[in-house]
Image: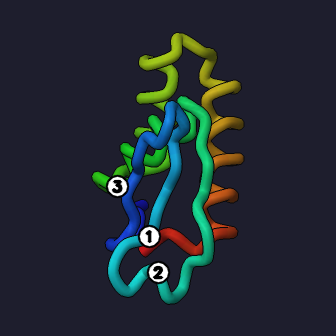
Amino acid sequence: MKIKEGFLLKNVAGNHVVVPIGNSTLDFNGMMSLNDTGAFLFGKLIEGTSKEQLIKDLMNQYDVSEELAAKDVEDFILKVEREDLFE
């Protein structure tokens, strides 16, 4: 899975936000706010990674169970899909 080109993760006044750039501004209205976990996952998705790797990375980064990591990743993927940010 990979985030479409034209979207950046920025830290604005201590908040993680996804902002469109270039032509992406025509299709994406507003900004997407993320917590630290969401920002971590979004960064991985910018690089391109699998769902399974996201779960492993989340477990390693936050020392959480596989069950919790899988739920968080699934919830995050749904959020990104609703915003139509995947290639």
Residues packed near mark 3 inside 10 Å, few (<14), some (14 to 19) or many (20 plus):
some
Report the colour scheme: rainbow
Label 1 Cα crowd, 10 Å radius (few <14 / some 14-19 / many 20+): many
The reply to whether the C-beta atoms of the residues labelled 1 and 2 are less than 8 Å apart is yes
State the mark number for residue 2: none
Quadrant of the image occupied by residue 73: top right
Q: Identify the element where label 2 is drawn.
A: helix
Residue 55 vs 42, above or below: the answer is above
Residue at mark 1 to residue at mark 3: CA–CA distance: 13 Å
Q: Which mark is residue 25?
A: 2
**Nearer the observer, disc 1 or disc 3?**
1
Of marks 1 and 2, which one's residue comes earlier in the chain? 1
| Viewer-nearest of discs 3 and 2 | 2
Residue at image point 67% right, 36% down: 72
Q: Position of residue 19 (x, y in %)?
A: 46, 62
> Label 3, label 2: how many angstroms apart (C-alpha)?
17 Å
26 up-or-down from 38: above or below: below
Residue 11 or 57: which is nearer the viewer? 11
Residue at the far top in the pictured view: 63
Task: Look at the image and tell me in which quarter the C terminus lies.
Answer: bottom left
* Residue sitting at x 43%, y 18%: 60
Rendered location of residue 67, percent (x, y): 69, 26
Number of marks in picture: 3
Q: Amino acid at mark 2?
A: Thr
Residue on which the image places disc 3: 46
- In the rendered image, is residue 52 in sight? no
Q: From the top left corner, tell me how far across and down residue 22 is, in percent.
A: 33, 80
